[in-house]
Structure formats: structure tokens, C-alpha cells
Image: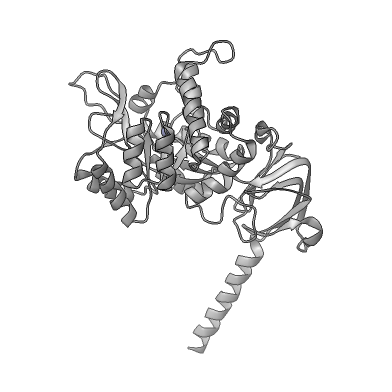
Amino acid sequence: MKTMKLIASIFLVAFFLNASGQSQTSYFITADRVFDGQVMHEGWAVVVEGNVITAAGPKEKIAAPPNSIRINYPNATLLPGLIEGHSHMLLYPYNITDWDTQVMKESDSYRTARATVHARNTLLAGFTSSRDLGSEGAGYADVGLKRAITEGVIVGPRLLVAGRAIVATGSYGPKGYDDDMKIMMGAQEADGNDLIRVTREQIGKGADIVKVYADYRWGSNNEAMPTFSVDELKLIVETARSSGRPVVAHATTAEGMRRATAAGVETIEHGDEGTVEVFQFMKEKKVALCPTLAAGDAVAQYKGWKKGAAPEPDKIKKKKESFKAALQSGVTILAGGDVGVFTHGDNVRELELMVAYGMPAMDVLKSVTSINADAFHLDHLGAIRQNWLADIIVVAGDPSKNISDLRNVKLVMKDGTVYKNER
Ligand SMILES: [Zn+2]
């Protein structure tokens, strides 16, 4: 008995030494500017011990821990690890391979192999977290991708995953093929009460988020129209909510957005035809907008628009107008580009377009850090703050003056581990 107790206490001591000794690398980092998720500061230092920020503030007030690694970045800005709001790790640009071909002709194993590279490129671009909204025909491959990243098997951002999305029967693609062909859908079809079963199934298979298409280009005229009724959407929301999971809605039509908002989704993706009234309704219901400006910009160019040399297509003009309406309405605006439609690692493209379409750069920086973290329930992330997780990047220059400075990444730290350090 006594021996057992002794062994137990030796084990405990060893455990504590291991936990606090072995992985406890500490850093004392200084840069010209520190963006804390809300405000830009000058002359700050940030201390990291293990995977946690243990101090942040004016450098003369902060003591460097003994044996800490001191790094100074002149002419640079330190920020919280950026958070991608809308990615598809299992897709890659449609001008390389069109969506139908990726979904129907490429095996899940091939697509997953590519996705491991997409994940790495995302992290090295300074995006330490990403909300991955649908594998588009690759089942729950993103759930497996998340596991491999979490276990440290591969390198990538911390993921929140949607697995398969839910679509109304007859609305989604690939489509336009002969009736006799058995076509695998890019998302899971369900209707009516069956939505309860499908939502539960998705959660059971590892989805962190349930994504639903509230409207889609539907029928022979290929025009975006609402699909599910408010009652159907409510079934999904109630079922997901009882498991503590949010529902997010793809919606481009004003009516699709209105129905999704009324049903209680947390975010609306795209929102292309959103009006001031719909955005105000979203604001009232605390539903955030993820505008995915870069997807529209990319698709228009894939369709032949010579940006800069030719006039803007109608779709781009309308998107700019609705984004202005969103800004005016005061609805919460998230930063998420629908990356996958364009190149993984080029995530800053969305942030540049947000500025180009009229959002102040400081507000964009808040969106891609603290506002995204809050909307996605990413606890202790998106800010440089004591006791917050050590997801930190450093970029050359000042992105509050020139948003494209976010492309010049010097340091990437996720959970206290350094993945890139160029000085
Ligand atoms: Zn998407």
C-alpha cells in the first residue's frame, strides 16, 4: 500500500516536471507595433510561455522570463494569428480544374493529399485558424484533416469543419447530366423532417458546424432562389443547437438571407443580394455576414473579365453596392474569402478587397482577428492578451496603413510553436 502511494507521488512529480519543464520554451518578442485585436500599440512587448501569452504591454513594464528567447522585429507589426472565415481545404482554383471535375472525377484520397498542402500554405500565410465550410463531395475528409493537424501529423491551421453541407433535393450540383447517371452530390440532400436525421448524422461524423444552403441556382434557368422553408431551417438549427453546434447558411438572395436569419443561423455566407433591410434584420438577430468578396472577384476573372483593363461586370458592381449597404447597416462583418475558389495561402486577397470596397483597414484587421474569433466561438484566440493562446504573427510594415503588408509574413507561431521565422 505504502509503495503504491510512493509510486503514485513519484509519477505525479515526474508528470509536473514534464508538463512545466520540457515544452516550456519562452519568448520575449518586441516589434514596432502590436495590434492586440482591437487597438494598435507602439513600444509593446509580448511574452509567450509554453502555448500561452503570459504578458503583453509597454515593454518597459514587462520583465523577460529567465532563459527566454528574445526576438525584436524592427519596422514590423505583431498581430494575433489571422483567422480565415470561409475556406474549402478540399478544393483548389476552378481555373486549374473546374468544380464538377474536382467533385466527380477526383478521388477523396487525391483531394486529401492536395488538402494537406493547402493547410500548410494557409498556416504559413499567417492564418493560424480556419473555418472550413464543406468538403464538396469529399465526405468528411476535412474532419480527418483536422485530426491530422491537431495530432501534429501534418502542419496546418486549427480547423473548425462543416463536413458535408445540407442542400434541398434537386437544388445542388454537379447538375445538367443525363437522368440515368448516378451523380454524387457536392453536399447532402435532405428535406422536411429528414433534416433532423441528416443534421444528427453530420454531427455524429465529426462536423463542428452544420452548413446549409438556404438558396441556390436552381432549376432550368439556373437562377438563385430560396430552397428550404423557415420551418425546415428551424429543424436544422434546433437539432444542431441541442448538440451545442452552430448552423451557418449559404445565402445570396435577400429572401434566403431573411429566412436563414429568422430560423436562427449564426452566420450568412456570401449575401450578394443583401439589402439594407435584410442587413438590419441580421444585426437585430445578431447574425453576422461573411461576404466572400474574393470568390466573386476570382470567378468573374475565370469567366474572362480582365480586371483593370475592362469595365467591372454587373455582378461585381452589385456586390460592391451590397457590401456598402452592409457597412452602413452596422451588421457584424466577418473576414472570409471562400478560399479554395482561389489559391490557398492567398487568403489576404479577401482583406485587400474589403479595403478596396470601402472598409477601413483597421476594421478589417479587427474582423480577421477578434471579430472572427468571437463569431466562431474560438475561445482565447484572436487577441494579444494575457492568458490567451499563443497564436501570433509578425508582418513587415504596418497593415493598418497598407493591408497588403499582411502578405509579408515574418513570424508564424501557433499554440506557442514557431512554424516560420524570417528576419
Ligand atoms: Zn464556400
Q: Residue 355 appears at what percent x and percent y?
A: 60, 31
Identify whether 61 is placed above or below 266. Answer: below
Displayed quadrant of residue 227 = top left
Q: Nearer the viewer, residue 162 or 354?
A: 354
In percent of the image, x 48 and y 48: which residue is there?
375
Residue 165 appears in the picture as rendered: no
Q: Residue 124 appears at what percent x and percent y?
A: 61, 38
View quadrant of ligand 1 = top left
In percent of the image, x 49 and y 38: which residue is there?
329
Residue 405 appears in the picture as rendered: yes
Q: Nearer the viewer, residue 64 or 279?
A: 279
Q: Residue 398 appears at what percent x and percent y?
A: 72, 37
Q: Is residue 287 left or right of residue 219?
A: right
Give the total of numbered labels.
0
Outermost residue on the top side: it is 310
Q: Residue 191 appears at what percent x and percent y?
A: 21, 39
In percent of the image, x 40 and y 46: which residue is there?
266
* Colouring: one colour
Identify whether 99 is placed above or below 189. Answer: above
Identify whether 167 is placed above or below 207. Answer: above
Outermost residue on the bottom side: it is 2
Looking at the rendering, in which quadrant would you find the C terminus? Answer: top right
In percent of the image, x 62 and y 61: which residue is there?
387
Displayed quadrant of residue 263 = top left
Q: Is residue 101 left or right of residue 29?
A: left
